[in-house]
Image (cartoon, rainbow, N blue to C red):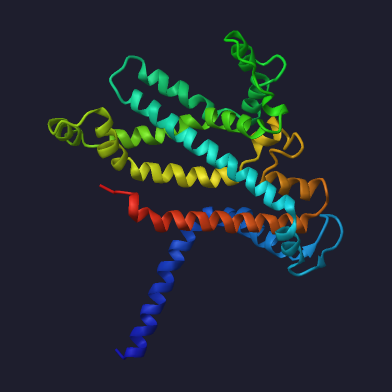
């Protein structure tokens, strides 16, 4: 057999192989293209136009991006989003770790407690936000009532520009701490008990075992939680929209809400598409930095 014939045979065999793979991937590939990739490319095309979702598109090139980069509102919504992430991510991780450590011990009713802590995760964000809006109500909320019992004058929470972002952070941490707990608990159960025994024989106390054994062995789970938390944090919307509606005085307006308002309130779908792609670029950059930096602190057993 000549080399050319052998090459054609290998090519046909490769095409059949990849054709079979594509056939099996088709049920998931079609929705992926139809509901993810195609809308993303459409938004990219729309970002170079002036468009109100009704009339024809008008080509403006990079004008939408230039306007967003010079608009103070863009910096403000990104700042609010960043403040939210800086508040909710540490709070969720520390809370989830504390609960996971407690539930990893041999305590009675831990299976029930795991379910109770995870229950908020599967609860609708609209319901959670409405409940926290009542809890943090400045006038008759349960939180301020409890603070008043101890002689503390409670803040205005979501009605106060200085406390609107902390209000969203509290509600978000309460809802998401159960998810972090489950991930970290799974990581804790995978840690070899011999490591703790060896550390105890060396005289390591609880805190030393935590920082020298537990946290290093939990680094893959921590990495997953941090990556997911960052991505979800940049896309925060539901709790802000229901709890504060971006107010008061736009003090809690975040990026995704700005995209929503530009599209459906102001009829600037092209501008909203450009802002969406800027957000996508930021999330991609942050994620890449995390993946590149994981070699320094993530330890895989």
Going 48% across and 33% down the picture, which residue do you hit?
92
In the rendered image, the vertical position of residue 10 relative to residue 87, given as above or below: below
x, y percent for residue 70? 73, 59
Q: Residue furthest top?
A: 149
Q: Is residue 115 left or right of residue 169?
A: left
Corner quadrant of residue 212: top left
Q: Is residue 23 left or right of residue 167?
A: left
x, y percent for residue 52? 83, 55
Going 40% across and 46% down the picture, which residue do you hit?
223
Going 67% across and 33% down the picture, which residue do you hit?
162
Q: Nearer the viewer, residue 42 or 94?
A: 94
x, y percent for residue 3? 32, 89
Q: Is residue 105 left or right of residue 66?
A: left
Going 44% across and 42% down the picture, which residue do you hit?
225
In the rendered image, the vertical position of residue 98 relative to residue 234, given as above or below: above
Corner quadrant of residue 46: bottom right
Q: Nearer the viewer, residue 137 or 266?
A: 137
In the rendered image, the vertical position of residue 250 relative to residue 167, given as above or below: below
Q: Residue furthest right?
A: 55
x, y percent for residue 168? 62, 32
């Amino acid at each position: 057999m000549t080399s050319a014939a052998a090459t054609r045979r290998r090519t046909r065999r490769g095409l059949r192989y990849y054709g079979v793979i594509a056939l099996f991937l088709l049920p998931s590939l079609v929705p992926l293209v139809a509901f993810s990739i195609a809308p993303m490319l459409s938004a990219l095309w729309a970002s170079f136009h002036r468009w109100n979702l009704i009339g024809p598109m008008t080509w403006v090139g990079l004008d939408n991006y230039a306007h967003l980069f010079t608009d103070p509102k863009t910096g403000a919504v990104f700042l609010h989003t960043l403040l939210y992430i800086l508040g909710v991510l540490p709070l969720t991780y520390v809370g989830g770790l504390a609960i996971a450590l407690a539930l990893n011990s041999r305590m009675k009713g831990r299976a029930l407690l795991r379910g109770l802590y995870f229950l908020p995760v599967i609860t609708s964000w609209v319901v959670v936000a409405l409940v926290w809006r009542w809890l943090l109500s400045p006038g008759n909320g349960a939180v301020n009532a409890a603070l008043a019992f101890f002689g503390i004058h409670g803040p205005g929470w979501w009605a106060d520009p200085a406390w609107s972002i902390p209000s969203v952070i509290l509600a978000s941490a309460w809802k998401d701490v159960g998810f972090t707990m489950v991930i970290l608990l799974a990581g804790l159960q995978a840690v070899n008990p011999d490591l703790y025994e060896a550390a105890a024989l060396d005289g390591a106390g609880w805190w030393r075992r935590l920082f020298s054994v537990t946290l290093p062995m939990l680094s893959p789970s921590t990495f997953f939680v941090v990556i997911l938390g960052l991505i979800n944090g940049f896309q925060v919307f539901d709790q802000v929209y229901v709890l504060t509606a971006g107010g008061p005085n736009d003090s809690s307006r975040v990026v995704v809400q700005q995209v929503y308002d530009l599209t459906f309130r102001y009829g600037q779908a092209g501008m909203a598409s450009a802002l969406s792609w800027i957000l996508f670029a930021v999330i991609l950059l942050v994620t890449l930095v995390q993946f590149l930096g994981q070699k320094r602190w993530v330890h895989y057993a």
